[in-house]
Image (tube, rainbow, N blue to C red):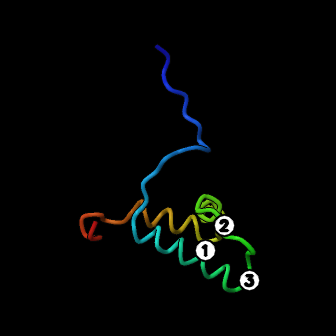
């Protein structure tokens, strides 16, 4: 029996409650400020993170963080 083919554009993922809340706040603020006329998807906004100028720093910090001391 062949293995299941994974589609990288259709992945179910768990994200932290705080992160989800932050994304929802960003969506609302973009609407309030008139940046968007309709609500943007979480996928579209999270895809922007890796394009941010500071992404490499965030990525490196996440690799190096001591998770036992980070409260998670």
Disc on res. 50? none
Q: Nearest the camera: 47 or 25?
A: 25
Query: Tags 1 and 2 in contact by the CB under 8 Å rule?
Result: yes
Q: Circle 1 — which element?
A: helix
* 31 up-or-down from 51: above or below: below
- Pointer 1 residue: 27
Among numbered discs 1 and 3, the one appearing first in the sequence: 1
- In the visual, does 51 lie left or right of 12? right
Quarter assignment of residue 39: bottom right
Q: Residues within 10 Å of mark 3 (few under 14, many from 20)?
A: few
Mark-to-mark CA distance, 1 and 2:
6 Å
Pointer 2: what residue? 40
Residue 34: assigned label: 3
Residue at the spot 66% in from the left edge and 66% down from the top edge: 40
Mark 3 → mark 2, Cα distance in angstroms: 12 Å
Report x, y in % for residue 3.
48, 22
Q: Which of 28 and 71 is in front in this view?
A: 28
Q: Which of 48 and 17 is in front in this view?
A: 17
Q: Residue at x 59, y 71 (%)?
A: 54
């Amino acid at each position: 029996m062949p293995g299941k083919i994974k589609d990288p554009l259709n992945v179910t993922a768990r994200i932290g409650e705080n992160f989800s809340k932050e994304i929802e706040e960003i969506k609302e603020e973009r609407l309030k400020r008139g940046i968007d006329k309709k609500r943007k998807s979480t996928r579209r906004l999270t895809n922007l993170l890796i394009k941010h100028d500071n992404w490499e720093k965030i990525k490196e910090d996440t690799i190096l963080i001591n998770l036992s001391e980070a409260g998670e």
